[in-house]
Image (cartoon, rainbow, N blue to C red):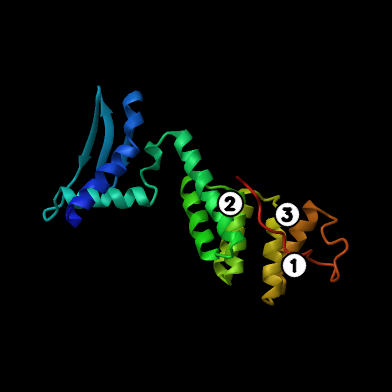
Amino acid sequence: MKSDNDNVLGKGIEAIFKRTAHLLKEHGKTLELPNGVICREGDDLIIRLRLGESEDIRTALSELNNMASEGMLDPLMDESRVKTQVSEHLEMALMAIEEGDYPAAVSEFEMVLKKNDNSDIRYNLALTLEMLGEYEKAVKQYRRAIKSNPKDVEALNNLGRLFYEKGDFTRAMEVFEKAVKIRPDISKGTKDGLFPPRFGFRNII
């Protein structure tokens, strides 16, 4: 039976080599890490890790495994593989939404954003956070989506409705005015002459 230390060692090594095999085909590519560097030198893949006075190789590889989990080693991955992972996380997020498992959807969208910062993904994340009642977090994500795409009327509308429903009428009107400038007929047919119903999730797979 393997010890916990052996498992850490194995996971750390696996995390590295899953993301570095293609470096052997790309001369001179280097990735700086907080505790070292991964690079190619000739026909060799070199991994240099700095150890503290009380650290050993298991500690260093454990840190690498953590960095891999957080997406910090993703620049070493093949672009095609990154796209595949993004699609998988998006599928899981949309499945979670269909099942009403919003915490799981938030987790999946956040994983996608580590690999691909996209305004549509942030819009979906913001809407998911709304469903969870995470008001401030939803506002933050809508704003980031709008910053990436200032003409995103759906994000503007949803953000405006969020402000309006929370009684923040000043900010609601500021956002609504921006939406109207982009789409003058946005409030056509609405009962209050303001925001249309909240726009739903986007299928971005």
Q: Which mark is residue 121?
A: 2
Report how far apart the C-alphas of labels 1 and 3 lie in the structure.
14 Å
Evaluate whether residue 29 shows in this view: no
- Mark in the foreground, 2 or 1: 2
Residue lying at the far bottom of the rendered structure: 167
Q: Position of residue 101 (x, y in %)?
A: 55, 64
Does residue 205 sit above or below 4 in this rendering?
above
Tell me which residue sits at (53%, 53%) in the image.
Answer: 92
In the rendered view of the protein, which quadrant contains the C terminus? top right
Circle 3: residue type: Val
Tell which of 139 and 63 is nearer to you: 63
Left or right, 202 with reference to 59: right
**Residue bearing the label numbered 1:** 173
- Crowding near pointer 1: few (<14 within 10 Å), some, many (20+)? some
Q: Which residue is mark 3?
A: 153
Of labels 3 and 2, the one closer to you: 2
SS category of the residue bearing label 2: helix
Image location of residue 202, percent across then percent down: 66, 52
Neighbour tally class for label 2: few under 14, some 14-19, many 20 plus, Cα within 10 Å: many
